[in-house]
Amino acid sequence: MSKIKLNRKKRSTDQLFFHGMLFLPVLFLFIYHFLPIPAGILMSFENFQPGKGFFGSKFVGFDNFKKLFLLPDTLPALRNTLIIAIEKIACNIVIPVGFALLLNEVRVKLLKRTVQTVTYLPYFLSWVILSGILIKFLSPGSAATSPGLFNTILLKLGIIKEAVYFLGTNSTFRQTMVVSDVWKNFGYNTIVYLAALTGIDPTLYEASAVDGAGRWKQTVHITIPGIAPFIILMTVLAIGNVLSAGFDQIFNMYNPAVYETGDIIDTLVYRLGLVNKQFSLSAAVGLLKSIVSCILVLTSYKLADKFAGYRVW
Amino acid sequence: MEMKIKKSKGRILFEVINFIIIAFLTISCLVPIINILAYSFSSSQAIIENRVSIIPQDFTLQAYKYVLSNARFWTSMKVTVLRVVFGVIVNVIMIMLVAYPLSKPDHKFHARKYYVAFMLCVMLFSGGMMPTYFIVSKTGLIDTLASLILPGAVPVFSCIVLMNFFRGVPEELEESALLDGANQFQVLSKIYLPISKPSIATVTLFALINHWNSWFDGLIYSNHTENYPMQSYLQTLVTSTSFSLEDMDVDRMLDMMNVNETNMQSAMIFISIIPLMLIYPFLQKYFTTGLTVGSVKG
């Protein structure tokens, strides 16, 4: 009897201990991640003025949302976000999968390792640093400065006749964003697929070799089906990010000349809020984005659980 | 099973093409970075004449001397070092505090599901930029070091990584310790933490890189540029789009007019990469552990 009692007592002190551990983290999350949610909802329905606070500002109903749809920047930003995000999702799957397959054919261990070490270096650098690098690398030059290395190479090879302003031309900006994003991330993404490749049962290859299957047939019938679940999982999880086209990257590389093709929802939220000081309008855009993203992420988690048995918690 | 068959012609052709593609992609990752390195060691004259590609021309340390003699660079470096040291400590403690209780099954920690629901809620739904800004401002954090640490004190994804690792720890270890009269604190510090060193190393490295690389919080939560961490300062130098609540264009104009703009910025960019290079070997060792957030049912 006493042992059970002791056990019960222990159980309840354990519970207290667990609650105690979670107190500080939950407090920080509550203040800085949870409170902004109701604050954002409040702001979206009022004409928020910092001096009057969340509860003193005037309630305006759906005015901000109406204004939002009359704003000439809203639709282009939504369109650009979707185009850039979807292109990035596709390229960030196809290229790393392809690269992993090619790298898997390399039998020299040292070469394989060196290639991996080098290709995931850009992943760890911030977009501020990479923008600093790429702005110079892609520069078309001006009266005072010479063109960057990329334009110089293209000019020397005769691929282009005059320097291209990749970051300042509407027809090239989005592609530049997609390519530079793939450039930053493909080395890192490749690792997921390489890990998946090593998980494929080697006896399958041996058996098919006995049956006379060549490399190509093995790739098509064993390797690709073997990593298909990972490809599906990564695709599904990426769907949740379709409204985030990469704020850090675009904010650091765009300029007013390419707002037409480069402005995305997140950069619009920034400009509305911190530059134009239309706090409520900015909060309203943020709220809409958050609602849609939340639905997309939940859907993607459901699908990931269904197709790949993947669970976050 | 040794393959004695000679490589076919097709196979050799494939291997050559494969090597070329891999070499091309690998080099493409390095060229822009080496290009910046070359700029940073070249004279302004060589840069203006477009003589610099991947090898420094008229080798000089002038750009580095300029950056290292700049008081603003050192101010921003100080902020960065402080935020990295305190930020990482706070992050790692918070990650452990969350991961341990939430790694317990529901029958051992009855309220677990409510905490998980809360975590999921803040993970899925974001208040957005402006509301967060005003909350940070209301809690009096503007222009303090705490504004760079407290809003991101609990990295939820890293919590999940460590939680999943804790879940893999055999239950018998805990049970026998509890039978011997150990309390939960001892179980955590004597059993769980020692065996999860690799996972803790992973989340620590993630926290470190995150703090070193963060620039946006510094930009919007600081009214005075002397509170900028290095990445925020760098951001105002290398891009043309930045905007801060305070007008700082005078400073920027002075920096922009500097004749050594290209090599000076390149030197600064390279200096900010060095610490990452130093921890790179550790990154390689540990970061793959953190790749898979969540778990796949067997």
Image (cartoon, helix red, strand yellow):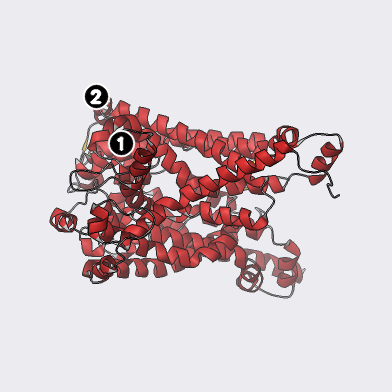
Q: Dot 1 surroundings within 10 Å: few (below 14), some, or many (20 or more)?
A: some
Q: Residue at x 29, y 69 (%)?
A: B61
- B32 displayed left or right of A76: right
Vertical order, B267 against B129 (above or below): below
Q: Can residue B256 be seen in this view?
A: yes
Q: Residue at x 25, y 44 (%)?
A: A141
Query: What's the amino acid at mark 1?
Result: Val
Asked whether A253 or A56 is in front, the reply is: A253
Residue B152 in picture, x, y percent from top left:
41, 57
- The disc placed on residue A70 is 2
Q: Is mark 2 on a helix, strand or loop?
A: helix
Q: Do labels 2 and 1 share a chain?
A: yes
Residue A89 in picture, x, y percent from top left:
50, 36
Picture quadrant of residue A231: top right
Q: Distance between the residues labelled 2 and 1?
A: 34 Å
Residue A58 in picture, x, y percent from top left:
20, 37
Q: Dot 2 surroundings within 10 Å: few (below 14), some, or many (20 or more)?
A: few
Q: Which residue is drawn at 36% across and 66% down?
A: B83
The residue wearing badge 1 is A164
Query: What's the amino acid at mark 2?
Result: Leu
Total numbered labels placed on residues in the image: 2
